[in-house]
Amino acid sequence: FDTGPFETFPLGHAEVADFLAAHMNTTLASEQTQALARAAWTGMRFSPDGNEMIITTNAGIILMIDAFEGGLVKVLSGHGKDDIDTKGDMPPLQACFTPDGKSVMSGSMDADVCIWDANTSQDQKQDWQPTKRLGGHVGPVKCVAVSPKFELFASACHNVALWTVP
């Protein structure tokens, strides 16, 4: 740790805005795209194989990047009816990979757990919506965690729910 980072790469607002404009099917005005690109990063997790990272934001989007080159791979949205917050006022939501790296899980403001396919070889010209939504909470799900040893994950709002990994 004494020598500093062995690699750094910029993931600037312009790159995120360009990716959002090119790859999301939702109709966003240019100023909305720029606002999303400036969202504060609130968390970061590596995939189990270490090839990708997910970055959570306070704007209702999750960025998936290549962990070695820093390039943006996917933008995960669709957390709920008010899933994108261009003002950045949304509470940060946690996200994590499943132990096999095939899925990304996150909380949502509408009391669901959202699950996405983490496959990065899919067509890049799409808006990645959850493949599955799990209900059962009474409030916004702000925390999720997956057990690396057991087929189990937890989600929390005002209560903690335990689930089997799908």
Image: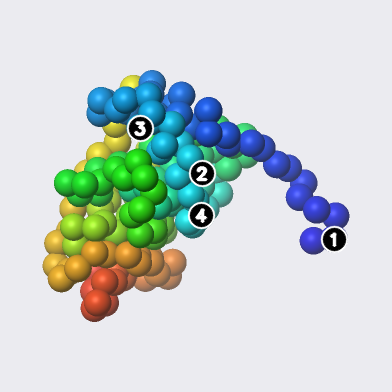
User: Which of pointers 4 and 3 indicates the residue nearer the eye?
Assistant: 3
User: Which of pointers 4 and 2 indicates the residue nearer the eye?
Assistant: 4
Q: Which structural element holds mark 3?
A: helix
Q: Amino acid at mark 4?
A: Met
Q: CA distance from mark 4 to mark 3?
A: 23 Å
Q: CA distance from mark 3 to mark 2?
A: 26 Å
Q: Amino acid at mark 3?
A: Gln
Residue 157 appears in which quarter of the rendering? bottom left
Q: Which residue is mark 3?
A: 32
Q: Which residue is mark 1?
A: 2
Q: Which residue is mark 4?
A: 44
Question: First in sequence: mark 4 or mark 1?
Answer: 1
Q: Are marks 4 and 1 in contact (CB under 8 Å)?
A: no
Q: Which residue is mark 2?
A: 52
Question: First in sequence: mark 3 or mark 2?
Answer: 3
Residue 142 appears in which quarter of the rendering? bottom left
Q: CA distance from mark 4 to mark 2?
A: 10 Å
Total labels drawn: 4
Residue 69 appears in which quarter of the rendering? top right
Which of the pair 136/26 is nearer the observer?
26
Tag 4: Cα neighbours inside 10 Å, few (<14), some, or many (≥20)?
some
Residue 20 in the image: state x and y as whole percent: 39, 29
Q: In the image, 86: left or right of 112? A: right
Which residue is pictured at 21% across the width and 47% down the height?
82
Which of the pair 118/35 is nearer the observer?
35
User: Which of pointers 1 and 2 indicates the residue nearer the eye?
Assistant: 1
Q: Quadrant of the N terminus?
A: bottom right
Q: CA distance from mark 1 to mark 3?
A: 41 Å
Residue found at the very far right of the displayed protein: 3
